[in-house]
Image (cartoon, rainbow, N blue to C red):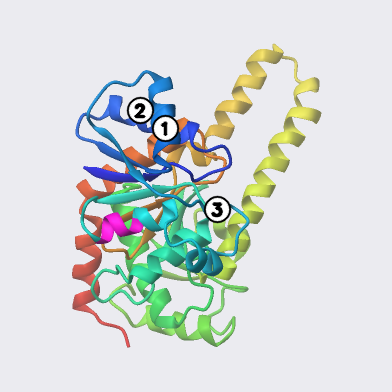
Amino acid sequence: MRIALDAMGGDTAPKPNIEGAIVALQADPALCVTLVGPQDQIEAEIEASGYQGDRLSVAHASQVVGMEEKPTEAMRQKPDSSISICWKLMAAREVDAIVSAGNTGAVVASGLKTRLFLKSVKRPGIAVTLPTTAGHAVLMDVGANPSARPSHLYQYAVMGEIYAREVLHIESPKIGLINIGSEDVKGNDLYRETFQLLNESPLKDSFVGNVEGRGLYQGEADVLICEGFVGNVVLKVSEGMADFLMQAASKHILGSLDVEQNQAKQAFQDLGKRFRYHETGGAPLLGIDGICIICHGSSDAHSISNALRGSAMFKDRGINSQIAEHLAQKPVA
């Protein structure tokens, strides 16, 4: 399995990316990682790490896209960025996957520019895994496509259902459409048309209808579909609320508990691990003819390692071939 890792992506790059790559290589002898970025800087970091082996290589990129840069401008002004080079390597089939903790918009924009889509896929979408009272659920899309059409959302349902089954091991995933009410007449034209499309599609037996925001974490559906604007707001609100609750709990509750403080603190940390992006590594950009994992900007070595190893599992499960096969059977206008 050959993976291009954007060595310069993230808030504290390149150190956690290089450390994560080394951890992944040590854990999986079938992995080969190409670190993409300024060659001299990356090679100096590798030498400082003491790593010895032939499964870690470097592809030079002279430019880096900052986390706050506008994606379209960055892609135009920085054609030799580490993000662009990663996509070029995958388009040339020199790698099977790319992993980046860099500017999410730039990663998506560069991918859309390559048009490296699976056959029949109209627009790729980002899928994230959310914790629920029933286990986990897939939320898609969370930012790749803020101007979606009903056919796009239908395809997200197809891709999300396959991802939930193969990665989250949910045997028969339930599909829900995020909306402002449970009735089928709720929402704007996009959501009403998507409701009808899903209700008449091959997914109709798995479609449970509209899911309100308060039902996201109650396990009402295993696959939650929306357009990228709504999905990104949901994701960011969820991250903020999780941080708030953990801080509030540690500040106001632990002091009143009649337990040993270190044990209580560890219990909260263990609970928090269920909600951390570090454990899943990153979110896949589904619909790409290849594998693209987008990591959080503050990803540490543990998260990067998990993302690299998760790429291998994505390939082993044959997710892309299943997506292409399903969409070929039922094209949507």
User: Picture quarter containing residue 33?
Assistant: top left
The secondary structure type at the circle numbered 2 is helix
Q: CA distance from mark 3 to mark 2?
A: 38 Å
Q: Residue flagged by tag 1: what amino acid is it?
A: Ile
Decide: is 6 above or below 323.
above
Where does residue 275 sit, x and y in percent of width and height? 55, 40
Residue picked out by circle 3:
218
Residue picked out by circle 1:
18
Residue 197 left/right relative to 244 = left
Q: Are marks 1 and 2 in contact (CB under 8 Å)?
A: yes
Residue picked out by circle 2:
22
Where does residue 186 sit, x and y in percent of width and height? 59, 81
Residue at x-position 53% and y-position 44%: 10
Where does residue 172 sit, x and y in percent of width and height? 31, 57
Q: Residue flagged by tag 3: what amino acid is it?
A: Gln
Decide: is 258 above or below 82.
above
| Res. 211 in view | no
Q: Residue flagged by tag 2: what amino acid is it?
A: Ile
Residue 312, numbered label: none
Front-most of residues 197 and 27: 27
Residue at x-position 32% and y-position 68%: 158
The secondary structure type at the circle numbered 1 is helix
Where does residue 250 sit, x and y in percent of width and height? 73, 28
- Which region of the structure is painted magenta? 87-91
Residue at x-position 51% and y-position 72%: 227
- Magenta stretch: residue 133 in it? no
Label 1 environment density (alpha carbons within 10 Å; few <14, some 14–19, many ≥20): many
Decide: is 134 above or below 301.
below
Residue 305 left/right relative to 184 = left
Decide: is 15 above or below 176.
above
Q: Are marks 3 and 2 in contact (CB under 8 Å)?
A: no
